[in-house]
Amino acid sequence: MKAKFFYLGHGSLRFETAEGQFIYVDPYAGEDYGPGADFLLVTHEHYDHNAVELVTKNPGCLTVTWKEALSGGRHNSFEKDGVVITAVPACNKNHDITKCVGYVVAFDGIKVYCAGDTSIVGEMQEVARQKVDYAFLPVDGVYNMAPEEAGRCAELIGCRHVVPVHTLVGGYDRSMAERVDVPGRIVVEPGETLEL
């Protein structure tokens, strides 16, 4: 079995590893929270990224929020069952860098960058060094990057593919995702699955 991404909606993401482990990031949107979580990642405290009550945790579930990610005043890494999670900086005028992170998650020989709520920050060079395969970037242009900035971000970090998410406050706008005009862009609508 190949690893998969399932788009719940908004900034809510779910990955399934080839071993059948489930990784949830920023639960809030969508209704398909059936599979229990082996990993639960939360980028920051805003309600639309932190509805952890939607997720059933499997025994031994590793939960990482911005608090654990930034413990000790640095961006931390976590490893469990072959999955490596590295917290990276995230911020903009709406999100404090001391209370917000993104994650680079490595599994099955794939690296995914879950940006959370951010604009381009100088520290994204750290993401570029990680050589990510898929970048899940916010593009609503209100609380995050607009599509053009997301395109520049994708080029800056050098990802193979960019999947625009967080396209519209309170909903989904395919046209915003399609405005991210870079090679390797993949448009995935809520409720759709992408084989990684």
Image (cartoon, rainbow, N blue to C red):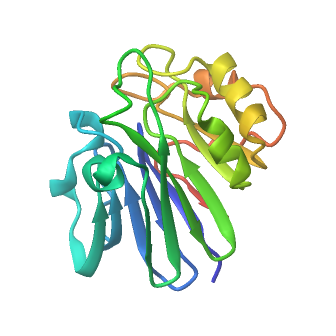
Q: Nearer the viewer, residue 72 or 26?
A: 72
* Residue 16 visible from this viewpoint: no
| Quarter residue 4 falls in | bottom right
The residue depicted at 69 percent of the width and 21 percent of the height is: 179
Pick out the residue farthest to the left.
53
Residue at 41% from the left image edge and 37% from the top image edge: 10
**The C terminus sits in image quarter:** bottom right
Q: Position of residue 74 (x, y in %)?
A: 40, 48
Pinpoint residue 133: horizontal percent, then vertical percent: 72, 55
Determine the residue positioned at 74% across, 54% down.
131
Q: Is residue 7 left or right of residue 129?
A: left
Establish if 137 lies above or below 38: above
Please say whether residue 88 is visible from this viewpoint.
yes
112 and 84: which is toward the camera: 84
**154 relative to 177 in the view: left or right:** right
In the figure, 137 relative to 58: above or below? above
Q: Residue furthest front?
A: 72
Provide residue 103's location: percent of width, then percent of height: 49, 51
Residue 80 vs residue 74, the one in the foreground: 74
Q: How many marks?
A: 0
In this rendering, would 162 be left or right of 172?
A: right
Task: Quarter of the image for the N terminus: give it.
Answer: bottom right
Q: Residue at x 78, y 42 (%)?
A: 158
Horizontal arrangement in the rendering, residue 57 relative to residue 41 (left or right) = left
Q: Position of residue 95 (x, y in %)?
A: 35, 25
